Image (cartoon, grey):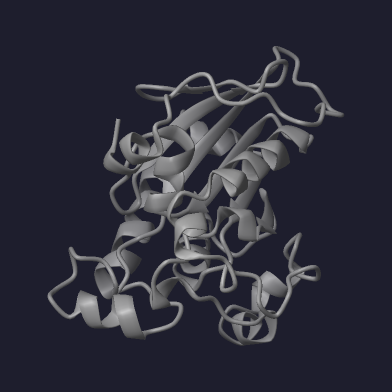
Amino acid sequence: QGLWAQIAGIQLVPCEPPLMQDPNPCVDGIKRVALIRHGQGYHNWSHSFTALYHLLTQKDTALTPVGQGQAQALRKAITADAQHPLHGVEVVISSPLSRAIETTLLAFGDADTPRRCLSPLAAERCICRCDYGRTPRELAADFPSVAGWEGFDGLQDVWWGKERSFSQEFRPMDRVEEFKRMLLGRKEQNIAVVGHGGFFECFCGVHLGNCRIVWVELNTADGSVRTLEGRP
């Protein structure tokens, strides 16, 4: 397990059962979810020593050219492999932070198939300035297609955890559970989520590198989470 999972004291399986039933149960009772971390951002330590400046002072940091290349490489990998499991996803859910939106657009294109969705539940733990988001109007100015994505119209001007305490966001297990309930409540069986290393680690216990993927299975009967070693 990764560092954040050890700190949070969570196991990969099982997780708490959902508080609501799935209104659209899967055929086999399993939802398969691809967790995809965004490409390298200016705040990431892998970029340079200036990452600390962006981490602490810059709001909603963007992808670096390296990060853009990582997302484009993911798209090429998907396109080149007819058996790639990401071909089977029915919806791509993105964090509303710019680095996740841009990764979604570069990796999956700006078409509406598969469906696109914005969800602040998938945002990074709001513990640094780089994790502060922007208003829907500002996001649409930079990424016009997001205005047509599911969830955009309901996005508040301040949708990130600005008012939550450091301890609440350092271990956002309440949001982890809400995120899981959201996934279980959707009708799709195969889902991709483009988000962030810290939040994903709290969710599944695995720390992802930039533009890396981990697949998890959600059991719709008991809400348990199983992290897969490879492709589903």
Q: Is residue 224 visible?
A: yes
Q: Is residue 75 visible?
A: no
Q: Note whether 165 is above or below 4 in the view shown.
A: below
Q: Residue furthest top?
A: 28
Spot occupied by residue 142 in the image (x, y as percentages of width and height): 56, 84
Q: Residue at x 48, y 68 (%)?
A: 102
217, 68: nearer the viewer? 217
Q: Note whether 63 is above or below 36 in the view shown.
A: below
Where's the N terminus, which quadrant? top left
Q: Residue at x 29, y 72 (%)?
A: 43
The quarter of the displayed image where residue 47 is located: bottom left
Q: Note whether 140 is above or below 33 in the view shown.
A: below
Q: Residue at x 42, y 66 (%)?
A: 127
Spot occupied by residue 143 in the image (x, y as percentages of width and height): 59, 78
187, 145: nearer the viewer? 187
Q: Note whether 205 is above or below 4 in the view shown.
A: above
Q: Is residue 51 left or right of residue 102?
A: left
Spot occupied by residue 210 in the image (x, y as percentages of width and height): 31, 54
74, 232: nearer the viewer? 232
Spot occupied by residue 205 in the image (x, y as percentages of width and height): 38, 34
The quarter of the displayed image where residue 90 is located: top right
Q: Is residue 160 left or right of residue 9?
A: right
Q: How many labels were placed on the picture?
A: 0
Q: Is residue 230 left or right of residue 163?
A: left
